[in-house]
Image: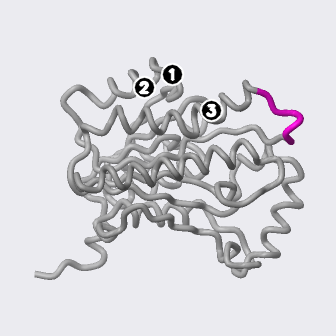
Amino acid sequence: MSVSGNDLLSLRNKTILVAGGTRGIGQAISLRFARAGAKVIASYLRNQQPAEDLRTIAAEEGLAISLCRADLTSEKGLEQLDLSLGESGPHLSGLVYCAATGIHRPIDELNDRHFDWTFNLNVRAFFKLIKLTKARFSAGSSIVAVSSWGATRVLPNYSLVGSSKGALESLARHFAAELAPSGIRVNILTAGAVLTDAWKVIPNSEARIAETIRRTPAGRLVTAEEVAYGAQFLCSDAASGIVGHTLVLDGGMGIMA
């Protein structure tokens, strides 16, 4: 009996951890997954209000979203997350790593503390989280690392964030090759410019957004919801043959010279 495309894209009976799942792209992914039938565990560290907003939306819509406050850069935070998952479960069908931070400054204004802060969350915590949760995954599970343009392109004041995203992508590809024989798929989701609160700390943001729109064939920025649909696809059974791939959602800007 054939399976319809809608059934393949459904996330029913899946439990998915969304790290950094209460703000911006992460919140959009948590909501999209829950609306597609998944049980979602959304982790976060700061910014209690977006977490409460997500809790409110989930209650209003009857969505299966639970929250876990944990610092993924610390052993204690990882232990908190592990405890929230429980000793005997849940079995995880997916992990989407949206947790990210960064310092947007020129080289002369960066220091070792900035480097450690950025790489600890953007790279090291992903490594530690995979190590922590690997035993909870079984064949058919999906891991998605959310990246950005700066992993492969030079952007102003983006050297630390961009290089950390490049390291994240490389780590994800190596994990993809190593975990694929166990039926665990690892892929990368690269978002173009998405209008989230993250732009508030980026220098000259209004001019950069305008220039991005001007250079994008679609004539607009991609939305967090569009990125979330990409994540849904990668975590669904429809993407069962996709391993170690980088899915780019940027409105076509990446193809321009």
Viewer-nearest residue: 47 or 160: 160
The residue nearer to you, when weighing 178 against 50, is 178
Residue 74: give its label: 1
> Identity of the amino acid at label 1?
Ser
Q: CA distance from mark 3 to mark 1?
A: 18 Å
Part of the protein shown in magenta? 106-111
Secondary element type, mark 1: loop
The kind of residue on which mark 3 rests is: Asn
Q: First in sequence: mark 2 or mark 3?
A: 3
Eye-nearest disc, 2 or 3: 2
Q: Position of residue 54 (x, y in %)?
A: 51, 43
- Residue indicated by mark 2: 78
Q: Identify which amino acid the numbered label 2 is placed on.
A: Leu
Q: Please rate how many residues cluster around mark 1, counting C-alpha atoms within 10 Å: few if below 14, some from 14 to 19, many from 20.
A: some
Marks 2 and 1 in Cβ contact (< 8 Å): yes
Mark 3, Cα crowd under 10 Å, few <14 / some 14-19 / many 20+, is few
SS for callout 3? loop
